[in-house]
Image (cartoon, rainbow, N blue to C red):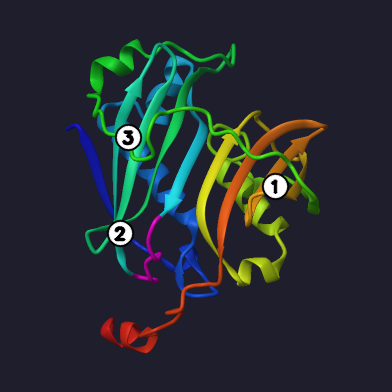
């Protein structure tokens, strides 16, 4: 099995209340779930790694939204594969489909960390179990360079709670995206559509930590940078590109879609 595919139906918790369509952060959640399911087929899921004193982390995540996001309750399909594995690094690439058409694509950089040293473990065992597909959705794997910071738009403080914590007992990477979204002004979110996200996870944070998220403009129109810090250290850095306006077909056929389920 060179590529792994998994189908999902968009549930209420994963839709954007502005237009009843899939939230970008939820698209990322489905991709990460597909990654976990794929590793489980080879007995390398998180619970398989724990007895070996290893755990998974994602260090970088890049995603482009190339078509209209699907509507609530619609079926989507995630296709994910291992595209590059070096001595320590593991890259996956992915496509996300709706009606057999790609609406999101991207890649992610993963590591297996040793629970005691917090350092990356060698990928020898991983290489033995997975096949590489030489197909890159966003081109060559390389660190995304964010534009230079401009004016600070806003800042928010967030104290992490139990809902932020994952099974590794540190803050879930999706929580950082939520925090960044909460930092952005409502009027901007209501009048713009996300086109891409470039996320770099720099340092772990834990229950009860106080995180400071700052949003900055850049010289590139509608390109924002969010920096999330703990005690002055960078924890997560997010670049996001937006376009003006929201989807014109916001809630079209809503009644028809609901009636079709009855």
Nearest to the eye among marks 1 and 2: give it: 2
**Is residue 213 shown left or right of residue 47?**
right
- Secondary structure under badge 2? strand
Rendered residue at 40%/42% (across/down) = 106
x and y percent of residue 202 in the render? 63, 29
Q: Which residue is mark 2?
A: 76
Q: Which residue is mark 1?
A: 161
x and y percent of residue 54 in the render? 47, 19
Considering only order in the chain, which callout, 3 or 1, is on the residue closer to the N terminus? 3
- Secondary structure under badge 3? loop
Rendered residue at 60%/45% (across/down) = 239
In which image quadrant can residue 117 be found? Answer: top right
Q: Is residue 9 above or below residue 89?
A: below
Residue 136 bears which disc, if any? Answer: 3
Nearest to the eye among marks 3 and 2: give it: 3
**Is residue 176 shown left or right of residue 211?**
left
**Is residue 14 shown left or right of residue 148?**
left
Q: Is residue 71 magenta?
A: yes
Q: Which residues are magenta?
A: 66-73
Considering only order in the chain, which callout, 2 or 3, is on the residue closer to the N terminus? 2
C-alpha span from label 1 to label 2: 31 Å
């Amino acid at each position: 099995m060179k590529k792994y595919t998994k189908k999902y139906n968009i549930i209420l918790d994963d839709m954007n209340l502005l237009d009843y369509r899939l939230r970008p952060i939820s698209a990322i959640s489905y991709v990460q779930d597909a990654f976990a399911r794929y590793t489980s087929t080879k007995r390398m899921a998180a619970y398989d790694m724990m007895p070996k004193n290893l755990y998974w982390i994602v260090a970088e995540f890049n995603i482009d939204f190339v078509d209209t996001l699907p509507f609530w309750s619609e079926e989507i399909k995630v296709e994910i594969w291992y595209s590059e594995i070096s001595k320590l690094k593991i890259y996956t690439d992915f496509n996300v489909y709706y009606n057999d058409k790609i609406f999101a694509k991207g890649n992610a950089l993963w590591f297996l960390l040793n629970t005691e040293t917090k350092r990356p473990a060698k990928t020898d065992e991983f290489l033995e179990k997975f096949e590489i597909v030489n197909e890159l959705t966003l081109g060559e794997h390389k660190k995304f360079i964010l534009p230079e910071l401009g004016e600070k738009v806003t800042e928010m403080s967030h104290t992490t709670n139990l809902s932020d914590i994952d099974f590794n007992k540190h803050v879930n990477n999706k929580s950082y995206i939520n925090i960044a979204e909460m930092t952005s002004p409502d009027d901007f979110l209501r009048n713009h559509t996300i086109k891409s996200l470039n996320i770099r996870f720099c340092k772990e944070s834990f229950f009860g930590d106080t995180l400071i998220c700052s949003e900055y403009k850049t010289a590139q129109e509608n390109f924002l940078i969010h920096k999330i810090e703990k005690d002055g250290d960078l924890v997560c850095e997010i670049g996001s590109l937006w376009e003006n306006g929201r989807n014109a077909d916001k809630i079209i056929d809503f009644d028809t879609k609901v009636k079709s389920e009855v």
